[in-house]
Image (tube, grey):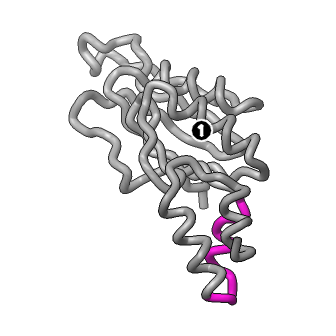
Amino acid sequence: MEKIFPCLWYDENAEEAVRFYLSVFKGSQILKVTRWTEAGGARKGKVLTISFKVNGVELLALNGGPQYKFTPAISLSVPCRTQKEVDYYWERLSKGGKEVACGWLEDRFGMSWQVFPKILPELIADKDKKKADRVMRAMMDMVKIDVKKIVDAAKGK
């Protein structure tokens, strides 16, 4: 069976979005570009799809037209090891977009992202329910996740 990968629907700016994502995630690459054929009418020769890889994950960007827009119902998750990584991805992905809540943001293309420290879901799933609740409550008060505050909440500080 072939692998499954998400297709991200853009109006006409898939190339711009892919270039942006490649600039944010170092070591990412374009795998394949397809172009509209004669069947695309006025779009003939313009980019139809771009297959690309970000942090080892394959994605497909499609210039499909204005019919559909992104919603937060689908998001891309960026688990980070340190606060420095959280800050790096948060700053770049949210620029020109909007910060939402609990580590969620929307980039300038409307794509939703979750930028969080890898320790967060581990702490929320902790067997100590009081600890997990403290961490959850701390997270719920944040927009960008603060690793120190999450760890302090886990310790009961």
Residue at position x 71%, y 60% in the image: 118
Q: Is residue 28 visible?
A: yes
Q: Would you name the residue on which mark 1 appears?
A: 90
Quadrant for the C terminus in the image: bottom right
Q: Secondary structure at mark 1?
A: helix
Among the 4 quarters of the image, the one containing residue 25: top right
Q: Nearer the viewer, residue 65 or 16?
A: 16
Q: Is residue 125 magenta?
A: yes
**What is the magenta range?**
118-129
Q: Amino acid at mark 1?
A: Trp
Does 154 appear above or below 76? below
Position in image of residue 10 (x %, y %): 37, 31
Q: Is residue 7 visible?
A: no
Does 92 appear above or below 43? below
Residue at position x 57%, y 21% in the image: 19
Position in image of residue 123 (x %, y %): 68, 73
Residue at position x 54%, y 26% in the image: 18
Among the 4 quarters of the image, the one containing residue 66: top left
Q: Is residue 25 magenta?
A: no
Position in image of residue 4 (x %, y %): 55, 55
Residue at position x 65%, y 23% in the image: 23
Among the 4 quarters of the image, the one containing residue 127: bottom right
